[in-house]
Image (cartoon, rainbow, N blue to C red):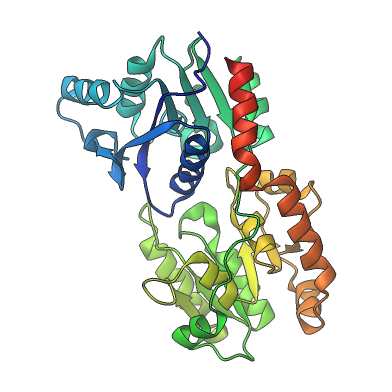
């Protein structure tokens, strides 16, 4: 059985409709499938979806597995094709993954892997995601493709895609709302605060540049106390700002307000700021995460978070050629405008 090229597509995940990476990328694929003529619906354990099944949420406590199986079967019953976004990839709710996989046996499905169990140290002992002759696997980097192949699962790579001409944000209002003067340097870390996002590295960069540090996302996964400790240690070495500039502020506003973007992570399945910073014409200081090296090979020019001197020199005498180059690379290799056509060709081959 191949994959249909029309009909109803249901996207299912732990959560949808938020600002986490999986939700953001799932929305882009929903847009692309709609462009191809699919009727798209969404199902999730939490967030904003057409249908919520709470038992699918991360760390949900399910008292009755039979009820969850019935709810999932009903929610996916109308789908000609199901796109599973990370729910069967990273076992944050193992029962949810098992139920969705069992429901989809023998049916056309795409399993899109943003993260895989062994890529998280505390889950490294777990095996590969489920598979079925009727399913196709997609991952967001070539490293995951190789790792799946080593476990006898064939997958295709679709890098995350982005609006090649994003809207301009409001720099003046953003900096005024944050209380940052025009002569001050502002370093933006547009991530949540969890261990692998390496907030300490972002703080060190801001201190090294004599800049204000801005952490956009909240702490998660019990990281609250560690974040408070890091901010206290930073002390008066750098001012620390947290959260959006104002409640309705967009990512475009955040990128416009800052002078430098930092992505100090030790692990990312992709790391959207690596490309977003280029499209918003901001220099990027990046950490050591392995997939970052893969993305960089497309031709990006980035700075190292552990060596602020070259970045400080660039900021003192900005060279627009670096921004021009990074923007051109992002548009050439990671454009959202290309996604519907790529999916259409891929569906034809898969079918």
Q: Going by the image, does 211 lie left or right of 251?
A: right
Horizontal side of 207 relative to 122 (left or right) equals right
The residue shown at (69%, 65%) is 285
Residue at point 44%, 77% (across, down): 245
Quadrant for residue 7, please give it.
top left
Indicate the position of residue 95 as horizontal and vertical percent values: 30, 26
Quadrant for residue 284, please give it: bottom right
Residue 342: x and y, percent? 65, 33
Q: Nearer the viewer, residue 90 or 230?
A: 90
The answer, for residue 245, to whether it is visible in the render is: yes
Is residue 305 something one can see in this rendering?
no
- 25 or 124, which lies in front? 25
Q: Is residue 184 above or below residue 221?
A: below
State the image coordinates of residue 205 (x, y, percent, origin top left).
Answer: 65, 72
- Please report the residue visible at 74 percent of the width from the left and 60 percent of the height from the top: 327
The answer to whether 48 appears left or right of 259 in the picture is left
- Residue 130 image point, x, y percent: 46, 18
Question: Going 16% across and 23% down the picture, which residue do you hit?
Answer: 67
Q: Is residue 51 above or below residue 236?
A: above
In the rendered view, does 203 fall on the left or right side of 328? left
Q: Pick the quarter of the image with the C terminus.
A: top right
């Amino acid at each position: 059985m191949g994959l249909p090229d029309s009909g109803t597509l249901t996207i299912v995940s732990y959560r949808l409709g938020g600002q986490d990476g999986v939700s953001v990328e799932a929305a882009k694929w929903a847009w692309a499938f709609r462009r191809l003529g699919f009727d798209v619906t969404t199902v999730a354990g939490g967030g904003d979806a057409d249908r919520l099944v709470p038992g699918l949420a991360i760390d949900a406590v399910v008292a009755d597995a039979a009820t969850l199986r019935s709810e999932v079967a009903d929610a996916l019953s109308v789908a000609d094709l199901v796109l599973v976004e990370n729910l069967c990839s990273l076992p944050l709710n193992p029962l949810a993954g098992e139920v969705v996989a069992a429901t989809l046996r023998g049916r056309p499905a795409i399993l899109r892997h943003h993260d895989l169990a062994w890529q998280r140290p505390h889950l490294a002992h777990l095996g590969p995601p489920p598979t079925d002759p009727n399913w196709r696997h997609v991952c967001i980097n070539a490293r995951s493709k190789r790792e799946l192949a080593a476990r006898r699962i064939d997958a295709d790579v679709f890098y995350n895609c982005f609006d090649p001409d994003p809207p301009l944000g409001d720099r003046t209002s953003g900096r005024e709302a944050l209380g940052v003067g025009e002569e001050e340097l502002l370093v933006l870390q547009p991530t949540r605060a969890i261990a692998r996002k390496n907030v300490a590295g972002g703080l060190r960069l801001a201190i090294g540049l004599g800049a204000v540090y801005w952490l956009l996302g909240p702490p998660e996964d019990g990281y609250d106390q560690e974040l408070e400790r890091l901010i206290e240690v930073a002390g008066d070495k750098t001012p620390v700002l947290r959260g959006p500039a104002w409640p309705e502020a967009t990512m475009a506003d955040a990128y416009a307000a800052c002078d430098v973007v930092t992505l100090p992570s030790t692990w990312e399945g992709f790391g959207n700021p690596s490309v977003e910073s280029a499209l918003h014409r901001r220099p990027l200081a990046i950490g050591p995460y392995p997939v970052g090296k893969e993305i960089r090979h497309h031709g990006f020019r980035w700075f190292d978070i552990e060596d602020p001197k070259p970045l400080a020199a660039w900021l003192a005498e900005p060279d627009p050629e670096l921004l021009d180059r990074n923007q051109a690379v992002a548009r050439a290799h990671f454009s959202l405008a290309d996604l519907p056509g790529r999916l259409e060709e891929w569906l034809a081959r898969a079918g």
